[in-house]
Amino acid sequence: MSVLQNPRPLVLCGPSGSGKSTLLKKMMEDFPNRFGFSISHTTRKPRPGEIDNQHYHFTNLDDMRRAIDEGKFIESATFCGNLYGTSKAAVDSVKRQGKVCVLDIDVQGVKQVKNTELNPWYIFIKPPSLDELKTRLTARKTESEESLQHRLKVAGQELEYGTEENFDFIVINDNLESAYAQLKAFLENQVLKPNEN
């Protein structure tokens, strides 16, 4: 296994409930030494089982806004009243290890990253339909009716953006094994190939 020289980061985007986290988990298990996860910052409270500096860097609104104003973030977005973002330090930390830095971000974040010099690979994880997405989100039993409706509204906008020519690769997750096989093939044939330049 060769270490990639200055590897391009990898952006994974997809609506809440698209199966993105499950695919990401499988990818990290299969390629533990090739990818490093960019740990996002958030102002939301930890959910049960979430650990600070492992799942997220949990912070407060004032500190995060100040860091954003100081240019320390590549992207940031507000979702369900909470601020989320990717710091430059989180990405640099992974790159220094010779790994492809993975950014798990939403469409707002993708649009911001496209205005930077980061030059990542962009992959969109798409659910088969909004109805299926609603079924998955409801089954989680973690959403209030209000937050469910908000997530579905945002998902509709994300799906619209995800079908345009905004991504290098789109995975339709109607079957987990098939979706992961598509993702894995793209990673092996594109993302993990040593750059020719």
Image (tube, rainbow, N blue to C red):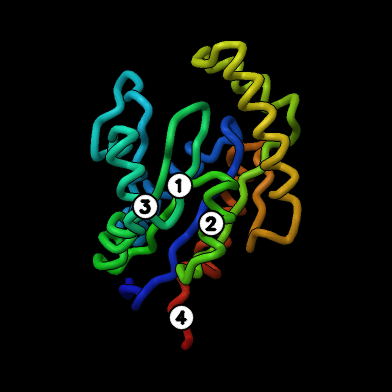
Question: Type of residue at label 4?
Answer: Asn
Alpha carbon distance from label 2 to label 4: 24 Å
Q: Check disc 2: other Cα within 10 Å, few if <14, some if 14-19, many if 20+.
A: few
Residue 115 placement, left or right of 25: right
N-term mark: 2 or 1: 1
Question: x, y percentage for residue 75?
Answer: 45, 52
How many numbered markers are drawn? 4
| Pick the front one: 15 or 30 | 15
Q: Residue at x 54, y 65 (%)?
A: 115
Mark 4 or mark 3: which is in front?
Answer: 3
The kind of residue tagged 3 is: Asp
Q: Are marks 2 and 1 in contact (CB under 8 Å)?
A: yes
Q: Which residue extends farthest bottom?
A: 197
The answer to whether any part of residue 165 appears in the image is yes
- Callout 3: SS: helix
Identify residue type, mark 1. Ser
Q: Which mark is residue 112?
A: 2
Quadrant of the rendering where the N terminus is positioned: bottom left
Work out how far the residue at label 4 is from the one at label 3, CA to CA, in angstroms: 34 Å
User: Can you identify the residue that label 3 sits on?
Assistant: 69
Distance from disc 2 to disc 1, alpha carbons, whole Å, reads 8 Å
Q: Secondary structure at mark 1?
A: strand
Type of amino acid under label 2:
Gln
Where residue 22 sits: x, y (%)?
A: 49, 37
The residue identified by callout 4 is 195
